[in-house]
Amino acid sequence: MVSTIKEDQNWHDTWAYAVGTSYQLTKQVVLRTGLTFDQSPTNNTDRSPRIPTGDRTIFSLGLGYQVMDNMTIDLAYSYLKEEDVKISRSNQLASYNAKYENSANGFGLGMTYKF
C-alpha cells in the first residue's frame, strides 16, 4: 500500500534581536558579552518532529588577548536555551506525542594575525 502524507509547515517570518558590548580591561585584554533573542518560524499548531524548535535565547561571553601588535587570541562561550515545546500529531496512519527540551553549549577559539 502506497500513500501520500501531506504535512503543512506554515512557517512565518520572524525577528531576531541581539545586543552586545565590549570592555577594554587593559591595553591587551578586552571582555565581551552578548544576548540574542531568536523567534522560531514554526507555530504550536503545525510544529513537527522534523523541526521541533521553539524560541531561542543565547547568552555569550568572550575574551580577547592581544599577544602582540599584529596578533590577537579570542576565546568565546555561548549558552543557547530553547523554549520547551510539546508536539501532538496524528494522521490516518500513526500518532506522535513528545516534549522537546533543547539547550546547547558552544565554545570558540580564534586567532587574528594582521600583516
Image (cartoon, grey):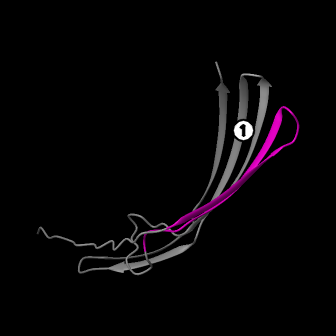
Q: Residue at x 40, y 81 (%)?
A: 45
Quarter of the image where one finds residue 113: top right
| Magenta part, dominant SS | strand
**Outermost residue, right side:** 26
Q: Residue 40 at x, y = what percent?
A: 48, 68
Q: Nearer the viewer, residue 88 or 33?
A: 33
Q: Is 4 left or right of 78, judged from the image as shown?
A: left
Q: Residue 96 at x, y = what percent?
A: 38, 75
**Outermost residue, left side:** 1
Q: Which residue is drawn at 67% across and 35% down?
A: 109
Quadrant containing the N terminus is bottom left
Q: Which of 60 and 19 is in front in this view?
A: 19
Q: Which residue lies under the disc numbered 1? A: 75
Q: Which residue is drawn at 16% across and 70% down?
A: 4
Quarter of the image where one finds residue 107: top right
- Residue 108 appears in the figure: yes
- Region rendered in magenta: 15-42
Quarter of the image where one finds residue 58: bottom right
Q: Does the magenta stretch include residue 21?
A: yes
